[in-house]
Amino acid sequence: MSDLNTQAVARYKNNFLREVEERVEEGNMVKMCMQCGVCAGSCPFGPHWQHSPQKIFMMIRAGKREEVLSSDSMWMCTSCYNCIVRCPRKLPITHIMHGLANYAHRLNLAAKGQPTRDVARLFWNNLMKTGRINELTFSLGLYFKDGFIQGIKNSLAMQAAGLGLLKAKRLNPMEIFGGHKCKEKSGIHRMIAKAREIEDRRRGLA
Ligand code: SF4
Ligand code: SF4
């Protein structure tokens, strides 16, 4: 169990709703859900989710901490905002879904091998190296994340898209040597560290 998770379990005991209210973005709105099911019926990804937003809110109130935080459901949210537009109680469902995913990630409880999470991590790590995303190393990192053989297979499967990007000058092979970067990388790192410090303090995670 990560330190942050041990600390959260001790602090909130069996009150998962309070934990969500205090530590998840817009989590204080979860209690407003009246379980009408409109969000579940409106979500284009609905049939592919293990738990719809409506069910996740019900599970939070029922104290199903492990099931919610280790679920890959909230990682499926595409931010289409259908649910927010239609919710009669005006819950910021999209933001809560992303907030739950982020919180599960911080506690190291998030679903392992979840594709959205893997892409987000690769993207973030790539971006943080130079302050700008390097499309070539990001794509290669994605294709080769499950090993060399799988990487070759993925690259061959995507060769038409890759060649199209090269032709359109959207992919530069020379980026393999580092590529474009921000002038003051350390300044960006300091800014991100400060933003994280402020956010963690606000959410009681510091
Ligand atoms: S639409 Fe709103 S009130 Fe209805 S179940 Fe979804 S979150 Fe709850
Ligand atoms: S914003 Fe997310 S949860 Fe809401 S309807 Fe779209 S995909 Fe579903």
Image (spheres, grey):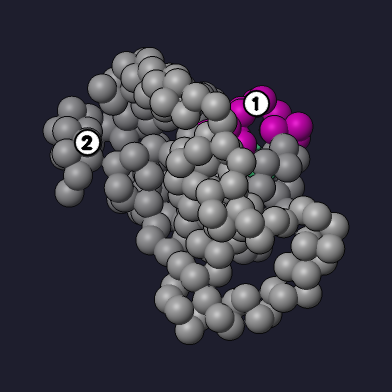
Ligand 1's image quarter is top right
SS type, badge 2: helix
Between 23 and 86, the residue placed more toward the observer is: 23
Vertical side of 155 occupied by 178: above or below: above
Residue 149 pos. (x, y %): 48, 84
Is residue 107 visible in the rendered image? The answer is: yes
Asked if 155 appears above or below 60 in the picture, the reply is below
Q: Amino acid at mark 2?
A: Leu
Does label 2 or label 1 sit earlier along the sequence? 2
Identify the disc placed on residue 4.
Answer: 2
Residue 58 shown left or right of residue 205 in the figure: right
x%, y% of residue 181?
A: 57, 37
State yes or no: residue 89 in magenta: yes
Label 2, residues with CA under 10 Å away: few <14, some 14-19, many ≥20: few
Say left or right for 191 vs 163. Answer: left
Range covered by the magenta-colored residues: 84-97
Location of residue 187 with respect to 125 vertically, above or below: above
Marks 2 and 1: which is nearer the front? Answer: 2
Residue 98 visible to the viewer: no
Q: Residue at x 68, y 80 (%)?
A: 157
